[in-house]
Amino acid sequence: MPSKTDLSKIICFDTETTGLDSTAEILQLSIINAADEVLFDEYIKPSHHLVWPEAQAIHHISPEMVAGKDSIEAHHDRIMGILEDAQYYIGYNILYDIRMLKQAGLSMAPFHRKHVQVIDVMRNFAQAYGKPDPKSGRTKWQNLTSCAKYFQYDWGSDKAHGALADTKATLYCFKKMYNL
């Protein structure tokens, strides 16, 4: 786990997407550092999807909201610079967000460097929270709003299911879990 002197190398990120499958595209990407500074927060125009009603019902990002935005390719160098500068990657169900970056054509090389750590707050919280799934007996995953409630996170005027709001809540929960 990072020490307090390593905080400058921690980034937390989240995506909002057109869906969950292998054709899903990123609609919003937010990245903050451990000092709660916003490094990247953009809506992104998808290349292939025109509508995403099921996902829109959750995150409320409409086709009109991204119609005039740049594609992920236009942000490639900026995103890669942020990813390459980090040593710790924090997220809630982070493997999904990493898969979305890969599906968007971004290199996975930053995640495979020596001494890099990928920390999934969702998995770690599920272990700490300890609620067994009645069907499987395994520890049950908890959603971000449950985790945030457990750690008494104040959403303020933000609402869950926006990439920036979720990133801020995830980083807060991470810091609480590891006393940072």
Image (cartoon, rainbow, N blue to C red):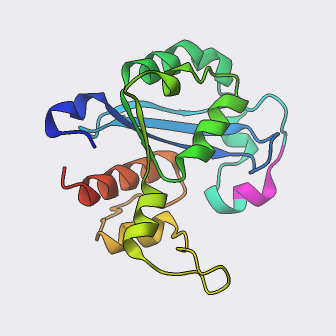
Residue 55 is a magenta residue:
yes
Most frequent secondary structure within the magenta stretch: helix
Q: Residue at 84% across / 40% down in the picture?
A: 50
Vertical side of 45 occupied by 1: above or below: below
Residue 157 locus on image (x, y percent): 37, 60
Left or right relative to 173: residue 158: right
Residue 79 locus on image (x, y percent): 51, 22
Left or right relative to 62: residue 120: left
Residue 45 visible in the picture: no
Q: Residue at 47% across / 63% down in the picture?
A: 144
Residue 164 is a magenta residue:
no
Residue 148 visible in the picture: yes
Residue 48 locus on image (x, y percent): 85, 32
Nearest the viewer among 68 and 53 is 53
Q: Residue at 74% across / 51% down in the picture?
A: 20
Q: Which residues are magenta?
A: 51-56
Spot the residue most to the top.
77
